[in-house]
Amino acid sequence: MKIFEGISWATYFEVVLFSLAAYYGVVILLFFKSEVMLIVSGQSTWLHRNNKTTSDASVEAFIDDDQQTQIKNLLDEITAVIKQARLKSYPKEELSFALENLLSKDEFIILRKPSLRKATDVYIKDECENYCSMQLSDDEMRRLWIGR
């Protein structure tokens, strides 16, 4: 086959890569045209999330400054309990009990709202992993809010 003798492997791979790029470019444009147009126009939040989900942003829109300050203080209390658990080498059960007692206080009622509870759960899980290297399951998180 003398036809293929004039084509080097480098040329072959260039043609294959160009063909694949063109194919996937067409597929993306056909199936995701609206998303691509948003990204190109700069209106997409996909590239500019700043580690916040859209639900977090929508929750913040309905919270006034006083509540944000109160929430920050409550989250700081949660972090303090978790740091104390790390310093005193609490086992998981003791940390869960300390968090359960903290969350049962009346001032934590604002965090019991469904819109904030999920974000608080994520915060508690992250802090437990960061400071105590403990992972709390979803069932353990539910028990923190409702008690045993």
Image: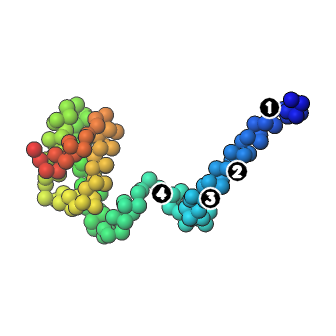
Whether residue 103 is situated above or below residue 6 in the rendered picture: below
Q: Secondary structure at mark 3?
A: helix
**Disc on the earlier residue, 1 or 2:** 1
Instruction: Let me know if residue 102 appears in the view.
Output: no
Q: Residue at x 51, y 58 (%)?
A: 46
Q: CA distance from mark 2 to mark 3?
A: 11 Å
Q: Position of residue 141 (x, y in %)?
A: 22, 45
Residue under label 1, please give it. 9
| Amino acid marked by disc 3 | Leu
Dot 4 and dot 2 residues touching (CB under 8 Å)? no
Pointer 2: what residue? 22
What amino acid does circle 1 point to? Trp
- Between circles 1 and 4, the one closer to the viewer is 1
Label whose residue precedes the other's in the sequence (1 or 4): 1
Amino acid type of the residue tagged 4 in the rendering: Arg
Residue 29 tag number? 3
From the viewer's perspective, tell me whether residue 130 is left or right of residue 148: right
Q: CA distance from mark 1 to mark 2?
A: 20 Å
The residue sitting at the left extreme is 148
Q: Earlier in the sequence, mark 2 or mark 3?
A: 2
Q: Nearer the viewer, residue 40 or 62?
A: 40
Residue at figure coordinates x 25%, y 34% from the top left? 87
Distance between the alpha carbons at the discs numbered 3 and 4? 23 Å
**Element assignment for label 4:** loop
Q: Quadrant of the C terminus?
A: top left
* Numbered mark located on residue 49 in the image: 4
| Picture quadrant of residue 86 | top left
Element assignment for label 2: helix
Front residue (pair 31, 128): 31
Q: Nearer the viewer, mark 3 or mark 4?
A: 3
Rendering coords of residue 19 (x, y %) = 72, 46
